[in-house]
Image (cartoon, grey):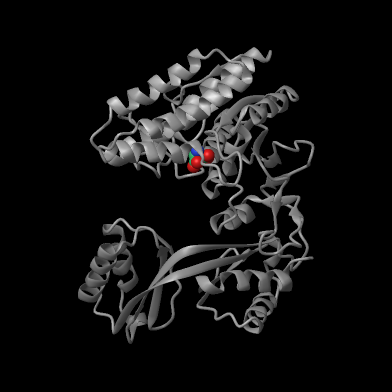
Amino acid sequence: MKVAKFGGTSLADARQITKVVEIVKADPMRRIVVVSAPGKRSSSDIKVTDLLIALAKAVQAARPFETELGAVVQRYAEIQRDLGLDPGIVTEIENDLRGRIQSRPGNDAQFLDAMKAAGEDNCAKLVARVFTRQGLPARYVDPKDAGMLLSEDFGNAQVLPESYARLAALKDIPETVIFPGFFGYTKRGQVATFPRGGSDITGSILAAAVGAHFYENFTDVDSVFGIDPRIFPEAQPIPILTYQEMRELAYAGFGVFHDEAIVPVVQAKIPICIKNTNRPEAPGTVIVPQRKYHHGEVVGIASAGGFSTIYLSKYMMNREVGFGRRLLQILEEEHLSFEHVPSGIDSLSVILRRAPLTPSVEKHVLDRIRKELRPDDVGIEHDLALIMVVGEGMRYAVGIAATACAALANSGVNIEMINQGSSEISIMFGVKETDQKNAVLALGRALLPH
Ligand code: ASP
């Protein structure tokens, strides 16, 4: 059995949805289909999820929202018209949206999730009808009935472990299952969504729950590339990657696959295949538990901006038992998660995502650090980019860091920070966002085949 997930561009219009039907028909192993909400039809288009967010914001601001509502309905109406479906489905979708607005919960984050989820939910209902009409009996499955239970972190939810046993029953459904991605329900019955791009996570959870042989992730590129082709035109496609390599690359900006979507399939060792809906015959990129690699081989270089560093120094910090714990406790109490903690003898930096650090949060956290830890110096720097150089072949290989540092120095890029994970399959460089592109280019030239 295969679980096949289709991303937003694969469902953007009637033509794309027809391709999806053909792909699923072509392989009877494709028994469970996970869908995103309709995505962009062109680079200037707007995803249905973003239209829904605009709608939710208008409602929250007590503004007239008919234009925003109309924009969402219009996207589904075009698909209905072009596929010759019964127009009743468009009325159902409009009623569904109005129903969600009417039963708006008091909590804004909760309401936003209920609205965002409408994109995938209505898409799955529509796609199930298209499949059945085109001769492949399909059943829309509601994540609530199937037992997709999520934590109450609205907009950033995580699956609850008990979901897996419940979702396993999906494999006994005789029709092709059409399951909406991106959302589930809390134990109290509220809609909650994964982070953006989270339909990949739904697909992975279902693959693990039913013990699929393969998790196919259909998108709009032929494969994962070793480096962003927009920065480095000689970028080569990667035929095979390990889970760990993909996780590290996805974490630092490889948008093709959500980094959190690796986790559910790891234990069950289910291979993932990234494929192109527009060219399903292309082999794609396969992601597996282990692979053969060449000594010293770097497989990919990823980069992401939007990070900040809190740096602290205190003479004799190394002798002060509990200093690090107290610092991290402050972050925990302020609900800030951290990404990395590089340290020296008398200094410590904490790297966090920039987004939650609003000016007031930032001031409050720095005040607490000053008061509770009494450092000699504390400060914060924004606009940091992280660059990950990744490859299983980097284990035990000597000289990669030296080559990378030399390449950055020769390009005039100042390294703000270097960190090597304990698995030794990645080296992370922190650079100023203004140097990000240059740094990626320099590292690509020095370390990747081209
Ligand atoms: N539709 C959601 C988003 O745009 C989830 C997804 O496409 O995976 O983030």
Determine whether, in the image, residue 141 is placed left or right of residue 6: left
Query: What residue do we see at 25% from left, 37% from top?
Result: 62
Q: Position of residue 382 (x, y in %)?
A: 41, 70
| Quadrant of the drawing holding the N terminus | top right
Q: Which one is in front, 184 or 288?
A: 184
**381 to the left or right of 219:** left
| Residue 383 visible (yes or no) | yes
Would you place residue 118 above or below residue 323 in this image?
above
Q: Position of residue 147 (x, y in %)?
A: 44, 26
The reply, left or right, for residue 291 in relation to residue 426 is right
Residue situated in front as seen by the camera: 167 or 269: 167
Q: Is residue 64 above or below residue 408?
A: above
Residue 384 is situated, as x and y percent measured from the top left of the image, at 47, 70
Which residue, as the protein is rendered here, is positioned at the far bottom? 315
Q: Is residue 150 left or right of residue 182?
A: left
Number of marks present in the image shown: 0
Q: Residue at x 20, y 74 (%)?
A: 371
Residue shown at 50% from the left, 21% from the top:
141
Residue 198 seen in render: no
Residue at 38 percent across and 26 percent down: it is 97
Q: Where is the C terminus found, in terms of image quarters? A: bottom right
Q: Residue furthest left?
A: 371
Taking depth in this image into account, of 211 and 131 the one nearest to the observer is 131
Residue 365 location, x and y as percent?
A: 26, 67
The quarter of the picture where residue 157 lies is top left
Q: Which quadrant of the figure has residue 377? A: bottom left
> Hey, which quadrant is residue 207 in on the image?
top right
Compared to 397, does 288 lie above or below?
above
